[in-house]
Amino acid sequence: MVTVRQVDASFLETYDRIPMRVPVRCVYRLEKVDRGLGGILLREEPVGASTLVCRTPGVHMLDGREDLCVLWDIRVADSHKRMGIGQKLFDAGVEWAKGEGFSQMKIECQNNNVPACRFYHKQGAVLSEINEYAYYQEEDLRDEAQLIWYLDL
């Protein structure tokens, strides 16, 4: 039951204890036309996205398997990290993969992305391969090792 009543300023302390969290899936970027004299456009922009690859001949990460999909990437804007967006993207990817009949998801990560490694481990993925020379041909990436995780669907 909801009761609506008018209150005075003494209620503000109680009101301030109500969390203002809003699930963010996208944001409006304000674009001023003619420095604002021509109006303001609201351009919707995503704050996160993920990429899954499957059934694509020539993509070596798929190992020629028809029952495997690869979670290539999850990206969340810095301003929106730690808000559950990555989790929602991951969950959506897993549900899509299951719906498409895949039995496993392969996930690539790097040893310098500890938060992502912890995240995939928390999801139940198993670290199965380490290739410390995967990026060796690129001089600025020589300290990075490729970590491959597998998640049974």
Image (tube, helix red, strand yellow):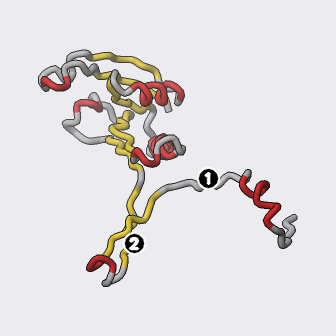
Residue closest to the far front: 9
Determine the image quadrant of residue 76: top left
Three-letter code, disc 1? Arg
Three-letter code, disc 2? Leu
Q: Nearer the viewer, residue 103 or 60?
A: 60
Residue pictured at 35% horizontal, 39% vertical: 73
Q: Position of residue 92 (x, y in %)?
A: 49, 46
Label 2 Cα neighbours within 10 Å, binned few <14 / some 14-19 / many ≥20: few
In the displayed structure image, the side of residue 23 where residue 1 appears, left or right: right
Residue pictured at 20% horizontal, 17% vertical: 133
Q: Nearer the viewer, residue 41 or 123?
A: 41
Residue closest to the far bottom: 38
For label 2, the residue is 42
In the displayed structure image, the side of residue 123 where residue 108 appears, left or right: left
Label 1 sits on a secondary structure element that is: loop
Which of the numbered marks, if any, corresponds to residue 21? 1
Which of the numbered marks, if any, corresponds to residue 80? none
Q: Is residue 148 above or below residue 42?
A: above
